[in-house]
DNA sequence: GCAACGGCTGTTACCGCTAACATATCAGCC
DNA sequence: GGCTGATATGTTAGCGGTAACAGCCGTTGC
């Protein structure tokens, strides 16, 4: 129990500071072996005799030692963190991506660390800078659109980067997602095929939600192929999405009463619209069809199933995490590109023709 | 541009490694000053002449230097991270707490890092251990119930700890929250006062959601004071909460048709129940009253406003963060204890007597 | 009997940065 | 001129771990 330290030069002696965080040295002294051996035991690295191992573990437990990853990371040049950057947490969509990531990372020793940008490019830069300065082993980031500065940081980080949710563009390294342009186009095709012609769009005003924009553009392109265009549009920002959906639906129908279909940029406002229509006694889907986007779980509980398109959120998270963890045998130069295909769910709000 | 290093002993020379992460040294060489001066410039610490400052900043920018916080933290014994531990992200409730925390931390230089436990004590231990090993400057953690090991870690961490959401118990250090027991009791009082007598409870099966449990116990205590007890109960786990609310409501009413009030442990299942009742043509609130808990934004979009109780989530997050950031002038020994009072919102689903 | 070897443990030299102190420079002042 | 003090910059010694290698010891093979 008595340490035989050689006179430490000028250094402050490890006097019995109260509440000084414990170090390897404390455990080493308590168990009578070198710091190196303690380190080996605690990391299960290298050969250590069972007797020594037990002694060390007992001492570590008794003292309540918690390793200092900062020091460990600096010395080993290895950090078990994966940076995850998403626009929002209040969207229901991103937590599901996170769940996929967490699951896939669970048995890898890697740990996701989340940063939120609120759909703002400058926030993205700031968050990225902050996160990269912890030297993570990988980055998973939503979207393909980044500022020049962000892009440069990602390119120079020297670690795997996976851009997720979207594949309409050129990735820095890997990408996993769906084509929102295609999703919009397919929805347009399905709606036209069902015979609807006077179509309105309701969505978010946010100019930085590139995926919503791409869906809209794809949708418009799909209509254009049939020689049609949107009969009316309505945008919102902020507030309770469900309520906004309700209000916007009322507004757009008041303004353009002959609409026969409403395409919502997300399920939440779609659900609000659906509730409004049912209350207003509108015949859905015959007089008016409705569709949203995302395939959120919430829809299961509504009076009628809203047509939607599943965005493969969980799967996107899982695959992205696997790429970072190196679970996918990619011999490709450059990163992987994985395009998932969302499936359209007709529900009860598109008539079957 | 040429470094005059004295023959580095056995060390590998800083040869022109491709993709080697940049260090202070690179910036120092590029700008012709010492590493220390670069460090000063980048941290805005100490006096540096404007000319030098500009030169250094220019070089750092040009090279794309990102500081290594791992090394910085180790040297300065300071880490700008705040650990936040919550049970779930898919609950809508916790993201709002997070938003409050983020906001309050925004101008402090501190950065929240989130860990999720899924309501499992062992996960909490594991996450806590992992997080504490990064030596954060504070911990915000949901709930007052922790395993002995977790409690010991928190007590020994030597940093401020704020337990949030709940005040029914003894905190390790500080606590900020509401009394769920009281919330349950007050809801019981309001319901009884409105004349309801045959009351059912619907909630989650999760045995580790201590706050839901405390609300139920408080509620029962409130009923007991009037000589009543719950007429029936129904529990669920997993799945779409909205749908479960619907299904459970149907089930409990089928089993016990004479119930005149349903108290839901959260708004989401309450909303499902509300939708079910409206469709089933049940007269709410006269034949049957309904109430939930949390005051989630979603309720604004429903056909009728569900009675609920606001859990002060955002405010809890803000106050917790302020405590960690030292913004509150607390001269108390030990931590602060802040009890917020949720207010009951009657909405349209409790009759007014 | 001895070199070779494998299992176990210790020693040394950093990882990249910063606190603390030392040094250089220069203006102002008696 | 010499001293003081402020300003600007450099030097040194770690922070708490880990990689790499060195050393010790008892076997093993021949």
Image: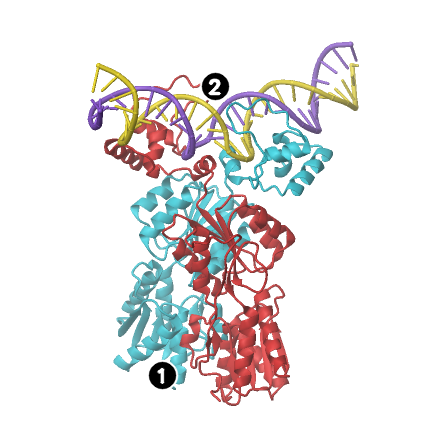
Chain colours: A red, B cyan, C yellow, D purple
Horizontal and vertical percent for residue B28? 64, 32
Classed neighbour count for the residue bearing mark 2: other residues with Cα under 10 Å, few (<14), some (14–19), many (≥20): few
Q: Is residue D3 above or below residue A52?
A: above
What residue appears at the point 31 percent right and 21 percent down from the top-left corner? A2
> Does dot 1 land on a helix, a strand or a loop?
loop
From the viewer's side, name the closer residue of A351 and B2. Answer: B2
Q: Quadrant of residue A37?
A: top left
Q: Residue at x 34, y 48 (%)?
A: B125
Examine the rendered structure and indicate whether residue B318 appears above or below residue A294: above
Residue B39 visible in the picture: no
Quarter-of-image position of residue A300: bottom left
For marks 2 and 1, give the CA distance.
82 Å
In the shown orientation, is residue A27 left or right of residue A259?
left
For residue B287, which numbered disc appears in the image? 1
Q: Nearer the viewer, mark 2 or mark 1?
A: 2
Q: Nearer the viewer, residue A32 or B146?
A: A32
Confirm whether residue A80 shows in the render: yes
Q: Are marks 2 and 1 in contact (CB under 8 Å)?
A: no
Question: Horizontal placement of A213 versus A353: left or right?
Answer: right
Please provide percent x and percent y for residue B248. Answer: 32, 75
Answer with the quarter of the image where residue D6 lies: top right
List x then y, in percent, for residue B268: 41, 70
Count numbered badges in the picture.
Answer: 2
Q: Which quadrant: the N terminus of chain A?
A: top left
B276 displayed left or right of A143: left
For residue B110, above or below residue B32: below
The residue that mark 2 highlights is: A10
Give the letter of the chain under mark 1.
Answer: B
Report helix, strand or loop for mark 2.
loop
Rendering coords of residue B24 (x, y %):
59, 35
Q: Chain of mark 2?
A: A
Relative horizontal placement of residue A83, taking residue D9 as reference (left or right): left
């Amino acid at each position: 129990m008595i340490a035989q330290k050689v006179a430490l030069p000028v250094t402050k002696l490890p006097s019995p500071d109260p509440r000084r965080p414990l170090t390897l040295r404390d455990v080493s002294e308590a168990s009578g072996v070198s710091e190196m051996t303690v380190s080996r035991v605690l990391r299960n690295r290298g050969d250590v005799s069972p007797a020594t191992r037990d002694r060390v573990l007992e001492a570590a437990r008794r003292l309540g030692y918690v390793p200092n990853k900062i020091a460990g990371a600096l010395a080993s040049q290895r950090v078990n963190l994966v940076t995850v950057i998403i626009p929002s947490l209040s969207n229901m969509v991103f937590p599901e991506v996170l769940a996929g990531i967490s699951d896939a990372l669970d048995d890898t020793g890697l740990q996701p660390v989340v940063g939120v940008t609120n759909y703002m490019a400058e926030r993205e830069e700031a968050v990225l800078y902050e996160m990269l300065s912890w030297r993570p082993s990988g980055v998973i980031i939503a979207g393909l659109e980044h500022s020049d500065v962000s892009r440069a940081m990602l390119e120079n980080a020297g670690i795997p980067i996976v851009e997720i949710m979207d594949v309409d563009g050129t990735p820095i390294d890997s990408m996993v997602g769906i084509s929102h342009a295609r999703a919009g186009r397919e929805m347009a095709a399905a709606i036209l095929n069902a015979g609807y012609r006077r179509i309105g769009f309701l969505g978010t005003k946010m100019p930085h939600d590139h995926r919503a924009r791409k869906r809209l553009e794809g949708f418009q392109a799909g209509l254009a192929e049939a020689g049609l265009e949107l009969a009316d549009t309505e945008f919102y920002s902020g507030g309770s999405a469900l309520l906004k959906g309700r209000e916007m639906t009322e507004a757009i129908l008041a303004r353009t009463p002959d609409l026969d279909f409403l395409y919502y940029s997300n399920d939440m406002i779609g659900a609000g619209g659906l509730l409004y229509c049912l209350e207003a006694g509108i015949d859905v889907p015959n007089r008016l069809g409705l569709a949203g986007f995302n395939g959120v779980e919430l829809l299961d509980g509504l009076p009628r199933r809203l047509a939607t398109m599943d965005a493969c959120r969980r799967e996107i998270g899982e695959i992205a995490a696997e790429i970072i963890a190196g679970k996918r045998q990619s011999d490709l130069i450059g990163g992987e590109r994985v395009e998932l295909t969302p499936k359209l769910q007709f529900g009860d709000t598109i008539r079957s023709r």
